[in-house]
Amino acid sequence: MTNCQYDGKLFELKQIGSSNSMLQRGGIRSYQIVNDGTDDQFILYGYSRSVTRTIITWIFIILTVGFLRLIFYWKPHWFLQCCCVRADLAVCQYVLLKDRYKQWYVETVLKISTNPNPNDSNSFRNSIPINPSRHDSFSEQQQQADDRDIHRYFINKRWRYVWEETEYKFVKLLGVEHNVKCEYFRQIRPLTIEQRAQKKIIFGENSISLRLTPILKLLIKEVLSPFYIFQLFSCISWFADEYVAYASCIVFITIISVIVTLYEVRKNERALRDTVHQSQVTTVLIYNPETNEEEQRDIISEDLVPGDVIIIRSSTIMQCDAALLNGNVIVNESMLTGESIPVTKVQIPYYQSSSDHPALNQTFDIHDHNRFILFSGTNVIQTRYYGAGDVRAVVLRTAFSTAKGELVRSILYPKPVDFKFNTDTYKYVGGMALIALGGMIYSLILRIMRHERAATVFKRTIDVITIAVPPALPAALSAGLVYAQNRLKKDNIFCISPRSINICGSINTVVFDKTGTLTEDGLDLQCVLPIVRSYDTINDIQQIKFGSETTEVTDLNWRDDEAHSMIIVCMAACHTLTRINGELAGDPLDLKMLAFTQYELYEPAANEQANFDMLFPTIVRPINIPNQRITSSLGHLSGSVSSLIAGNIPFEIGIVRQLPFSSSLQRTSVIVRILAKDSFDLLTKGSPEKIAELSRPETIPRNFNEILSSYAKQGYRVLALAYKPLELSYVKIQRIEREKIEHDLIFLGLVVMENRLKPQTEGILKVLSNANIRTIMCTGDNMLTALSVARDCDMIPDDAKIIVIEATESNRMPIFSYAQVYNRRVKEVRYDLNSHRLIELDRRSPYHFAISGKSFQIVRDDHPELLHRLCVRGTVFARMLPEQKQQLIETLQELG
């Protein structure tokens, strides 16, 4: 960012506040870039009121009979620039914002005092505009700036931006999660009353309340648009020229259009307000420094502030984003994600950890640590804590900075996806106006030459422009938009930004996910391929290979083979299933695997948990086991799992800790203790490539890749299972990082799931293809599985070739090869290493690009030219992480 350079006395203004830091800047800053590199990026300019400019501006407004003020209503930044002068950001009264879409916003700079009476609830809401006198002396300005209890801020799109004196700029006000180390969570304690009062003033209410816009304001906003003003001018002209019938029809249509538009806007506002506004009583912990004790108080959720430690209760709705400090919480995040599958949140591992925890110096990131975060708007189904005490969480973000707040902001302030449509509309109207202007001049000259009366010349000349520019255009656009929206509603299609409907006709690409979109939501378990170990007496080595396809759990030789026993245990216990009101709930894939093993999940009573010498939230056991108990004389038995299953004692698996699925890690794990064993086991399942990478090489069959490819080519979804014995204490188990134990695994086998196409998939894709709309598959599944599904649904025709682009960390240059037919030279394209350009050798031969997530990231970082060609000709994007999917969409939008 470049600072504007001034000299003379203006230079002294820069010294307001922290004079030492200001002297180093060498000038006054009257603008800055905010939120650099994000969708909310904008340039900010500082302005202060000028009496002289304001008087002159209003004189011209009066002289133009208010028409200039109407122009300023359409262009508020022009009004600001006419009435104000550029000022240093440290003392400016207004800020002018220009976002990346060239939209302008004018905001007033406010100030608040952070030293109120903490017992005065009304002081939390005090905020007054800054209006310093321009005739104050420099010493008075410095005295005001040195008052550390005064904070300056402005609000734009519900975000609060505060003046940071040390950095000499406005910064977005974020919660406690911003730029904080994980060590923050180690010795966290509740806030005091004074700390809460100060934070309440700075952060404001924890409320996503939406006020209904008054009808009169909506009406003025609607009718003062340029189109309606021109329409009003046209109708007056027609009535004056006795075009009563036509003008009356236009007026009637316009009135009906305005009424319908206002009705829809008000209905949508009311529906959104009723949906998002929620309030409930929350228990917060407050630290009393006098007694050095914590106190519990029930407050309304609007009074929560970042840093509060709260108690999480079952059957409640989260009103803030919070990090879970202890216990497990099962939530429903359907409001945010659309997925109604319960999600298990686990405690953050840094709370009350030892000071030598290796991750304490890492920067906390809410996206990387989302498995520990309870997001606002999610429904808390159950809370669990192993022992006495409440489940606690620390508030990270409140109000519109939460996940729910971001969702509401995206509805209130959608991206101007119809920007080009509006631009083209204005270009069309402008073009027609130019034609009309030429016609007006010609008509004016012609009628003057004919010596017609002045009134007739004026009327006929004005007629030209009122006819050339369609007067009913705004009414037609509004009526068409409302009609289209109602048609979509009948098919249960809802649009949060109705303006987007205008550009639906220009859509040329549709990107699909695979599982649950192109294919059925549920998966059928096709078979299990367990590992079989045999001993080669001739070569004196142990051989490991895949066994035969197993479709029934009874076919697994669990009595003699430890691997077969552990694969049953892994399928039965490696999940995040739970019982809600007695019903088993969770991922459909996990439900299928549990049903295959013929095990059941239950939550034991307190007296039953004594068998494990510790508390367990969930236990898994075979269905219809003998109702026997372990006696104390048995002690802690040791031995193989197969011997335990075959024994006469109840075989039960206690899930000690869950390590939830992470798309970046491509796996999920649990730590369990099998009843009567004196050690713990780590069970892991995930993508075959990732599990093989984490497993011991000697436990993986040599034909692993061939077997995996054979199933993937047939469109099956394949998961791999592995386990690892852990010789760790219970306390260590609860705190250890997953990366420290998820390695050197013992590979167990593969689980093959059948994922059928939805009946309507092929028909939908055919309709899109006939409309010349390109279709793309972007999935987190295996490449070969994705290619098989793409062939099955005719996304890739049978006669088209598939060219796979591969790039690795060791060799970052892209390599092209035919899918399923390797070691053949690609004839259609060639990548020039010198110019870094993709050269098409054969344009007539149809081909499609396919790429994996890892290769996509390398191409995006190192080969931007290839990235654009890839997005134009790419059809299958496999093993894509969520952020990579977003990057793909953004690149496609840039390409248009």
Image (cartoon, rainbow, N blue to C red):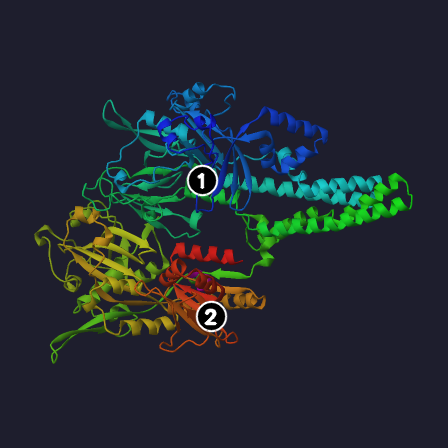
Do the residues bearing badges 1 and 2 touch, measured as CB atoms within 8 Å? no
* CA distance for labels 1 and 2: 41 Å
- Residue 296 location, x and y as percent? 30, 29
Residue drawn at 16 percent across, 62 percent down:
641
Kindly identify which residue carries mark 2: 839
Total marks shown come to 2
Considering depth in this image, is 232 or 458 the residue closer to the camera?
458
Tell me where the magenta segment starts and ends, as one range. Answer: 515-519
**In the rendered image, is residue 241 in sight?**
no
Badge 2 element:
strand
Considering depth in this image, is 433 or 239 the residue closer to the camera?
433
Residue drawn at 34 percent across, 40 percent down:
177
Image-based side of 14 in relation to 626, left or right: right
For the C terminus, which image quadrant?
bottom right
Question: Callout 2, which amino acid?
Answer: Ile
Q: Main secondary structure of the magenta part?
A: helix
Nearer to us: label 1 or label 2: 1
Badge 1 element:
loop
Q: Residue furthest front?
A: 8
Kindly identify which residue carries mark 1: 2
- Residue 95 location, x and y as percent? 51, 33
- Decide: few, some or many residues near mark 1? Use Cα within 10 Å; few <14, some 14-19, many ≥20: few
Question: Callout 1, which amino acid?
Answer: Thr
- Decide: few, some or many residues near mark 2? Use Cα within 10 Å; few <14, some 14-19, many ≥20: few
Residue drawn at 24 percent across, 64 percent down:
567
Determine the image quadrant of residue 383.
top left
